Every structure is written in C-alpha cells, then in structure tokens.
Amino acid sequence: MTRLLINNGTFVTMDAQLPQFEGWMAIEGDLIAGLGEGSAPEQEKSRATEIMDGKGLLFMPGLVNTHGHAAMSLLRGLADDLALQDWLQNHMWPTEAKFTGDDVYWGSALAAAEMIKSGTTTFVDMYDHMQRVGEVVEQSGMRASLTRGVIGLCPEDVQKAKLADAIQFAKDWHGAADGRISVMISPHAPYTCPPDYIVKFVEAAHELNLPMHTHMSETIAEVEQNVRDYGYRPVEHLDRLGMFSRPTLVAHAVHLNDEEIALLAERNVAVSHNPVSNLKLASGIARVPDLMKAGVTVSLGTDSAASNNNLDLFQEISMAALLHKGVSGDPTVVPAAEALRMGTVYGARSIGLEGIVGQLKVGLKADFIALSISKPHFVPHTDYVSHLAYAARGSDVSHVWVNGKQLLKNGQLLTLDEEKILAEAERCFQRLRG
Amino acid sequence: MTRLLINNGTFVTMDAQLPQFEGWMAIEGDLIAGLGEGSAPEQEKSRATEIMDGKGLLFMPGLVNTHGHAAMSLLRGLADDLALQDWLQNHMWPTEAKFTGDDVYWGSALAAAEMIKSGTTTFVDMYDHMQRVGEVVEQSGMRASLTRGVIGLCPEDVQKAKLADAIQFAKDWHGAADGRISVMISPHAPYTCPPDYIVKFVEAAHELNLPMHTHMSETIAEVEQNVRDYGYRPVEHLDRLGMFSRPTLVAHAVHLNDEEIALLAERNVAVSHNPVSNLKLASGIARVPDLMKAGVTVSLGTDSAASNNNLDLFQEISMAALLHKGVSGDPTVVPAAEALRMGTVYGARSIGLEGIVGQLKVGLKADFIALSISKPHFVPHTDYVSHLAYAARGSDVSHVWVNGKQLLKNGQLLTLDEEKILAEAERCFQRLRG
C-alpha cells in the first residue's frame, strides 16, 4: 500500500490534543496513519513510498460546507440586490424551472471545481436531478452528503412521485463512491411542505435510517406564516411532526426565540449557519453566540452561488468570526479557533462524520488541504489559527486530498477538466437565459 | 514616448458613460490615452509601442484604501478576540512603543506588497516615522496620501515637537515621488487630542493648504466621553474647532445621530468606512445607507492588519455590499456598483483625487489593475460588476499599473523584493516580541 510522508510542514489539526505544530504526517491508503511534531522519525522515512516537502505549506483538515445547491452556480450574478420575492419569483424560479439533468451536472461540476480549489473537501447538497450531482461527486473525488430537496406545494400524485424519487436516490446512492457519498432526507422547508407530507419524509428517514436536512426560519415572514398557518413557530412545528426524532441539520435558523434555541439544543439539532447568504438576501443575522452557548452544533454553509456569490468557505469562516462581534458588541464571541471549528470539525459533526473527517488525527480519513503561506498576509508568523480565520482566502489553497487521494496539486485540478467545465457551464447558462 | 495598447480585454470603468464592455485601452506615459469598445482601430495598433493581449483579463481602476496604518502589519495576529482596551493597552501600544524607523519601513513594505498583490494602487496612511513610509511609496511605485497621526496626550513641549514633525513631513513630502504622494494633516482623534491642540492642526492645514484626516466616533464610549469632556458629540465638536473648514476625511464614523449625518453632508466631509475592522473590534456598524442617502461621500478602508487581519480591499467591498443589507433588512441597499464605487472613484474623491484616479477614462492617470477571470467563481459571464463586488478576491489580481508603470505582472511584484520583505518583517516582529 502507498504511504505518503509529508515532512517539515506546519499543521493546524483542529484537535485539542495537538492544535498547531511544525512536524510531519503520514497517509496510508485513505487514512491518516501518523502525525507528530519535529522532523519525521527515520522509521517513517523508510516506510514511506513517497515523501513530500511541506516547507511553506500549512496543512489542515479539509473544509466542510454544510448547506448549498451546487447546480445554482449557473445562476451566479444573474440577479442581485433585489427584494427576496422579486429575486425568487421573477429570476431564480423561472430559470430553475428550465434546468435539465445536463444543467445540474455542469452547474454542480462548476461548483465542485470552485469548492476543491478553495479547500472544501465535503459538501452538503440539496437539489433535484440528484443522481447527476452524485456523478459529479463520484468523478471529482470529493465527499458529500446529498439530498433530494422536495417542495411539496403540488398535487398529491406529484408529491408521491417526488417522495419516491427522494427514497430511490437514497437507496441508490447512500454509501456510494467508496463510501464518500452519504444521503439525507429533505422536505425543502416547513413553508413549502404541508405537515402531513413532512411526516412522510420523517417516516422514510426512519425506515432508511438516515438523517434529515431542511431549510428553517430563514426569514421573519416565513416564521410568521408558520404561526399563522399551523399555530406554532417552525422549531416547535417540526418537533411536533417528529423530525427531530431523527438526527437533523437545519439550514439558516436566523429567526429563533430563546425557547426555540433551548429546544434545538435539547433535541441535538445541528444548525448550518450561512452568514453571507443571509446578509445578501437581507434575511437577517442568526443568533450564533446564543446557539453556541446553548450547546447547539453550528457549522457553516455557503448556500448557493446565486446568493453568495462564491463558494469560498474561508469567507464564511471569517464572516462568522467578524459579524457576531460587531452585532453583539462583544469582541470575544466566536473567536478564531471556534470559527475554524465551525468550518471543519463542527461541520463533520453536523452530518454524522465526526471522528471520520474534520480533524487531522491518526485513524481519520485523509481529507486535508495545504495552504501556501509564503505570502504577505501570512506574515508575521504569530498565530496560524488567527491567520486562517481572519487573513486567509480560499485562493491560498494549493493542494487538496480526499480519502487519501490528491484532487488539487499546485492549484491544478487533478480529477476534473476545469477548462471544459467552465465552457460547458457557460453554454448551459446561455441556453437557460436565451 | 511608450504607448501600451491592451486589446481584447473586458473593461469595468466605474464611469457612467461606458460602464462595462469588451474592448481596448491605450496608455501613453502616465495617462490613459484611449479607450473603446470592440477591437482596437488599426491606427491604435500602429501607434502602439507595445501590444498586450487582454483575453481572459478584466481591467478596472486600481482600488483606493482610504484608511490604514501600514506599519502595523507587523502586528497581524498578535492579539485577537480581546476587549478593545485590553487589546490596545496590553498588546498594541506596548509593542508599538518599541517601533523604530526600521520597523515602520519593513512593516509598511509588507503592507505595500500585500496591497499591490490584491489590487490597491492608492492608500491613505496615518502613522509615525512617516518619512520611512514615504520611502516605501517612492520605491514601490504606489500612490498614497500620507499623514503623521499625532496623539496629543503629552506635555506641551512634546506636543509642539509632534506638530512640527507633522508640518515638516508635509513640506518635505507633499507632491513627492512624481506627484504620487500627497499629504494630509492629522490630529489622531478628538479623544486623543485636546481641543486647543486640534485647532493648531487646523491652522497648519490652512497654512499648508492641505486636507485633514482623523479618527472619529469609532466607539460609543468615545462619543460619550466627548460629550462628557467637551459638551458636544464629536461631529459638532470638530466643526466648532474649525476642522471642517478644510476638506476632511474622517475614519470610522460608526456612531452618528441624524443631526451629525446632516452636518457631515453640509460640510462635505468624507467618511472612510472600515467595516471589517469595526466588526472585529466590536465597535459597531456604521450607518452607511443613511450617510449615502444624505449625500456623504463614503469610501472604504481596511484599517491596519492588526484589526482586520488583511489588507484585501475586495473583502471591504463585498463586506460593504453584504453587511448593510443584512443589518437593514433591505436587499437593495449598497448595490454591487455602489460598493465598487466606494472602493474606487469615491475613494479618489475622499482624498481630492477624483478626476485623477479611480476610473478608467481618457485623460486620467493610468492607475489600473487586471484580474484573471478564467476561473470558476467568475462563471457564468453574467454581470462583471456583480462578480467583482460579490465573488472576487484580491488574489484574482494578476497585473497592476500605477502612473502608467507596471508594479505587478502575473502575480509577481516588479518594484519590491517580496522574499526579502517577508524575511525582514518576520525579523522585525521577532525583535519586537522578544
């Protein structure tokens, strides 16, 4: 079996035992097989089938993007700075209605290229034509948690067909791509799915033994509508429908009261915080410090490139570290290390992958990235955790590995044809717009 | 005289007449000599002494960073996530007290390297040992508005010496480096300078016919102290001291009431908005949409790398476009084009350089940058103004010109020795920390 030894590198592990050090790491097959401070022992050197010089590179766990719609990268910049309903009803939905499986494939490939190049190794994706997203994950070598997001505002027979599609996708793809793909079950949101329809998804998730994912409380209007239509705010509503009897990840969770935060903590529901998208769509600012204080696992998502407008998780990390300080008036909330955990180990925890990815630790999957740090914005060499949270950008990422396989080398994609993807994505967009 | 023709480029001009197009631009000496849509006319091709293929590149005005302390890049990551007074009194000030001219030189060189590489061509700098900053500007080829920032909480003889130093610096350096350097006069802030001392700076600014720059209303505590000590909030206080009889740029202006906004507009005072620094230090969120509605010129500053922690003005542009939407709940405020103007033409206007830099327009100085756009996050080719505001990063900048001279080529600095600067900055930091 191949055994890669990385020597003389700077490591930020996201592991409390050995947080940052100069040292070495060994990768055997798809696993992290060794890790230590200082120069690699002679024994490690002799066992290695390949030795890489880590000088000038910072190694850390690959980033985990816990909410997005990859195919919507085709809609980047199509419409900005508009009121939410105008944006959705007059721009997003009419264009998305024309999406074919081909569009989903190339839009998702565009997103995968951008994510790999900016250091994301695992992503959550909720969309339609999910088998085409699965193909992109298979080919790109990334890790993903995929879910057919179902909008249930439709006749009963269409509802049935969509639920069947979501279940079939789960059966076909959960555990696929050497285990790099896992599947979640997703009614799109409480405001787009009638309660009895949501219950059917909860039942399916129990039968399939899979976690659930949904949009929740992104806007205040949504929360008010929920109270009007069903008598409860979204958290209690979903709890009553049984969703939180499954491991659940909710995206956004911007508008929560204290009781809802307590209930999310009690039910061990994870939150995907999407600060850039929430700001851009003027949805509001999630109560992240309160969620964390209550013990809720908070991770980070970009949402789609149509409301971001990039998929650079380092921007979400710095935004999370910055925004809540300014809003709360307390410069000690969401410190740098916590923001980085949100983008790595908390992301893994949110989708059931803690202890598998999200840290550099012996026995975990070898999902990691290397940033080039011989650059002005990484000098002086004070605290790399601070530099990663506040000064780094996705473009600092030079190398990416997932499951021990290298996907990016010196900024070049090894598994995807970038030039072809850019051209095909542009072609798809021109057809959709035409 | 040399005449550079750039052909087949994408241009975003920040000029209302011809906002974005595919075309050509000619540079003669230090000026933009021609600009047009489509392929360059034969006459242009024959006049050119050099022709550059602009395919895959987006050309736009160089960015203008209107508030910072370049030398403090040496303190990047030294102390984060602390309460403001702890940060200042226990970390920043004790370390800065040890700064020598050598530290200021290498810290400013580090900042210049980072700024050029991320597309900033003009910067405002307020610090001490300003002649060493002037040397960096001279050598780097950048454009700058420099000012000796004076803290007046000291005995009268020290006050006198500092004022004399500020005046001497202005006499020696205003108009230096082929006119690339201009000078402003700066009492550091109303809370660090007694009123009669501020008046002396106003008198000096009148004598020298120079604009003024100061920190103002960064924190709520500062505003309250001003009212306690002097009976007025900072805007009225500075107005009564005569400062606004000079063209003035104030940094931060986070805590303003309606009357103050109206007075700033009436006096034509420009505001340097520093959103990232204000968030990181938990100072608050400036009322930018209200300032703009009142007609105040609002530009963007990074502040120093100690409170940012990088000098990437594209991050300030996207932050300005995002933050005020989320805070106001209105997704139409600070639209993409306005955020880009804040980083370019409004920056120029803030420091008296409108009509000289900040736009691509015939007759203006050739201060411009080129971004590589054959990348996933610039696809599809919808609206480049949107992509620049929301998707771009400083690392997309490949080429930079100031005054017609190229400072960055394919990401490599042409006027500064990057490797030496990184090593010297690290050396300075280790000595300061030791």
Image (cartoon, coloured by chain):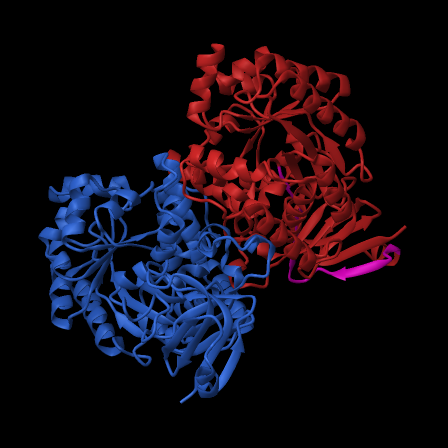
Chain colours: A blue, B red
Q: Is residue A215 left or right of residue A207?
A: right
Q: Which residues are magenta?
A: B47-65
Indicate whether B303 appears above or below A213: above
Q: Nearer the viewer, residue B78 or B18?
A: B78
- The location of residue A268, given as percent across then percent down, is 17, 55
Q: Dominant secondary structure of the magenta stretch? A: strand
Please, which residue is most extreme toward the front here? B434
- The location of residue B132, given as percent across then percent down, is 72, 40
- The location of residue B342, given as percent across then percent down, is 58, 37
Res B380 visible: no
Instruction: Name the residue rendered at 35%, 54% in the picture.
Output: A93
- The location of residue A83, given as percent across then percent down, is 39, 41
Please, which residue is most extreme toward the bottom here? A1
Instruction: Name the residue rendered at 53%, 37% in the picture.
Output: B94
Q: Nearer the viewer, residue B160 or A93?
A: B160
Q: Is residue A330 left or right of residue B334?
A: left
